[in-house]
Image (cartoon, helix red, strand yellow):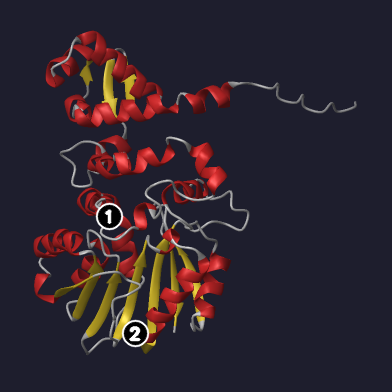
């Protein structure tokens, strides 16, 4: 019996249609968060009538939005009753300690979405159209939005990263957190290590948010701030760990290597740099969480990019580091590069 090859899939416009209409999906989740629809569904589930009453909307519109969210995987629906998926219950119900719906204040801020208004022209120019310098301009207010909105999304990677960065026992240790933002990464290390002193570097307005978070976490007495531009501020020295979280992707390779030489100079002889990033595989098409990130950098920065681990190895080696190692962080989309001086 001869085997027949599987028929080739027929050409389809589905991917094109789904992509062109993807803005509707963004609008739906934004509306659901603003209406606290996931809280309205609640732990026990709810009918469209109950949801409508709880969010103050007509039943028809509540039903349509709930059906859309069920079709796209944010809700379940069984016999006319809606329920929360495990992920929606954890991350999108405001009652949850892991609630991260507030991240839309940064991710969907006009400062970021406007960068994609004329992407064709951005591609022609090869750089962002946002005021020349994009999001890396000095004192850019978008980073205040980032600090206020993104901390809940960073809690898990911060805790996982802290577990991979043991500090010397029996003496005080020092950590420099570059572009600290909300401060979650340095704070997680301080909570795990009672002898550590953290210095957070960022714009002055952003550091006020980090200070508030440090106070709430009970580490304010060991949390210090250094305001200014990471490329210009004197780091001084004596650090055991320098954190570079979601920062290097904003710059081209020469700029990254220039900063990393400063980092190397401020580290103790056995110090380490910890770089948290969307690290691409060598094919630059995976993992999916990182593959789309270079487009964000094209739209919002003059020369930023997402890099592979091999790229980071070269950059750190050129800056004087002995070796680098790559760590996956489980369910977190970012990966951690630890580089040894």
Image location of residue 203, percent across then percent down: 23, 64
Q: Disc 2 designates what residue? A: 266
The mark total stands at: 2
Tell whether label 1 touches label 2 (CB within 8 Å): no
In the rendered image of this protein, does residue 315 appear above or below residue 7? below
Q: Quadrant of residue 234?
A: bottom left
Q: Earlier in the sequence, mark 2 or mark 1?
A: 1
Q: Disc 1 designates what residue? A: 140
Q: Is 191 situated left or right of 109 in this image?
A: left
Q: Is 215 situated left or right of 258 in this image?
A: left
Q: Quadrant of residue 22?
A: top left
Regarding residue 43, the answer to whether it shows in the image is no
Mark 2 is surrounded, within 10 Å at the Cα level, by few (under 14), some (14 to 19) or many (20 or more) other residues, namely many
Give the SS element for disc 2: helix
Q: Observer-nearest residue: 107 or 172?
A: 107
Q: Observer-nearest residue: 107 or 52?
A: 107
Of badges 2 and 1, the one in the foreground is 1
Q: Who's the residue at 77% across and 24% down the image?
A: 7
In the rendered image of this protein, does residue 186 appear above or below residue 113? below
Q: Who's the residue at 29% across and 19% down the image?
A: 66
């Amino acid at each position: 019996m001869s085997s027949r090859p599987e028929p080739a899939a027929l050409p389809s416009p589905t991917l094109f249609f789904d992509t062109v209409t993807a803005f509707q999906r963004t609008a739906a989740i934004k509306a659901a968060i603003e209406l606290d629809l996931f809280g309205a569904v609640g732990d026990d589930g709810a009918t469209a009538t109950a949801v409508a009453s709880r969010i103050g909307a007509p039943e028809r519109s509540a039903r349509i939005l709930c059906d859309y969210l069920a079709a796209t995987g944010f809700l379940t629906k069984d016999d006319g009753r809606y329920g929360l998926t495990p992920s929606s219950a954890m991350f999108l119900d405001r009652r949850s300690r892991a609630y991260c719906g507030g991240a839309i204040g940064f991710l969907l801020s006009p400062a970021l979405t406007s960068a994609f208004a004329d992407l064709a022209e951005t591609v022609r120019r090869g750089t962002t159209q946002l005021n020349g310098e994009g999001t890396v301009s000095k004192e850019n207010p978008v980073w205040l939005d980032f600090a206020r909105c993104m901390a809940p999304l960073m809690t898990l990677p911060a805790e996982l990263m802290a577990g991979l960065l043991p500090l010397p026992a029996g003496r005080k240790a020092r950590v420099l957190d570059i572009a600290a933002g909300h401060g979650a990464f340095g704070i997680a290390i301080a909570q795990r290590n009672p002898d550590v002193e953290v210095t957070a570097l960022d714009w002055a307005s952003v550091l006020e948010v980090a200070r508030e978070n440090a106070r709430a976490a009970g580490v304010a007495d060991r949390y210090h701030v250094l305001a200014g531009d990471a490329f210009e501020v004197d780091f001084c020295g004596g650090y055991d760990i320098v954190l570079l979280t979601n920062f290097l992707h904003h710059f081209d390779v020469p700029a990254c290597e220039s900063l990393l030489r400063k980092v190397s100079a401020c580290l103790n002889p056995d110090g380490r740099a910890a770089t948290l990033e969307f690290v691409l595989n060598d094919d630059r098409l995976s993992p999916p969480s990182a593959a789309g990130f270079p487009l964000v950098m094209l739209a919002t920065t003059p020369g930023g990019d997402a890099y592979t681990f091999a790229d980071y190895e070269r950059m750190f080696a050129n800056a004087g580091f002995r070796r680098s190692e790559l760590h996956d962080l489980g369910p977190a989309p970012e990966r951690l590069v630890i580089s040894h001086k």
